[in-house]
Image (tube, coloured by chain):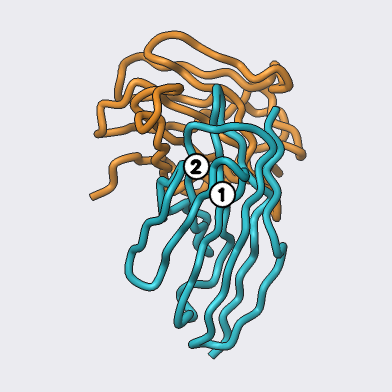
Amino acid sequence: GIQVEQSPPDLILQEGANSTLRCNFSDSVNNLQWFHQNPWGQLINLFYIPSGTKQNGRLSATTVATERYSLLYISSSQTTDSGVYFCAVASNQFYFGTGTSLTVIP
Amino acid sequence: DAMVIQNPRYQVTQFGKPVTLSCSQTLNHNVMYWYQQKSSQAPKLLFHYYDKDFNNEADTPDNFQSRRPNTSFCFLDIRSPGLGDAAMYLCATSRDPLGPAKNIQYFGAGTRLSVL
């Protein structure tokens, strides 16, 4: 199967700071999604981004498919951004990354 | 509006007592997935249905079964829950498991299962 590694595993930020989360994957994929898992456990879709760059408010993501990585940028972080961020990739099935646990402190 | 709905949100069962978790969707998606997520781990795919075709992951224990009576509903049956089955169970849907831009997954809020 495809190996999906995320870094860093844990991140603590002061409110207002910016951050970059990384997702590396070991093979070609036709789907890459970024999710935010909130403290209640729900996985919220952030981006569907198998290639290219997208932006949604304070969040943006870039996937360089040829180099097999994706980046999630969070700008001006807020306490509500806390939670676990997962990337998931798919070729013939889905593989979740190891996750980045983000804590934003006031 | 909730598009993938899981009931109940919290379920408590006794060791060895069968339990059923339910998932419904209003998206009319072909594919429904069940994941198990234990504390501080990534979700792990148990199985999925593509329409009526059932696809089991190789390492999913026989204790876990699934039913999909129609497009909208899918059930997860745990025949004899053990303490190690306590976890969050997540249901997801997508239009297609393989087609580019068709296999975006949408998740429900999950059911957190406790086994006493």
Query: For the residues marked 1 and 2, what is the alpha-carbon distance in whole angstroms?
Result: 7 Å
Q: For label 2, count other residues whose C-alpha is less than 10 Å away and answer few (under 14), some (14-19) or many (20+).
A: many
The residue nearer to you, when weighing A18 against A41, is A18
**Image: A7 above or below A2:** below
Residue depicted at 45% across the width and 44% down the height: A51
Front one among B112 and B18:
B112
Residue at (56% x, 26% y) in the render: A93
Q: Nearer the viewer, residue A32 or A96?
A: A32
Q: Where residue A36 sits: x, y (%)?
A: 49, 58
Q: Which chain does tag 1 point to?
A: A
Taking the spot 46% from the left edge, 16% from the top edge, the residue there is B67
Q: Which residue is mark 1?
A: A87
Q: Residue furthest top?
A: B53
Q: Inspect this view and state whether residue A66 appears.
A: yes
Badge 1 marks a residue whose secondary structure is strand
Horizontal side, residue A105 vs residue B62: left or right: left
The subunit letter for the residue under badge 2 reads A
Q: Which mark is residue A32?
A: 2
Chain A pictured colour:
cyan
At label 1, which amino acid type do we have?
Cys
* Label 1 close to label 2 by CB (< 8 Å): yes
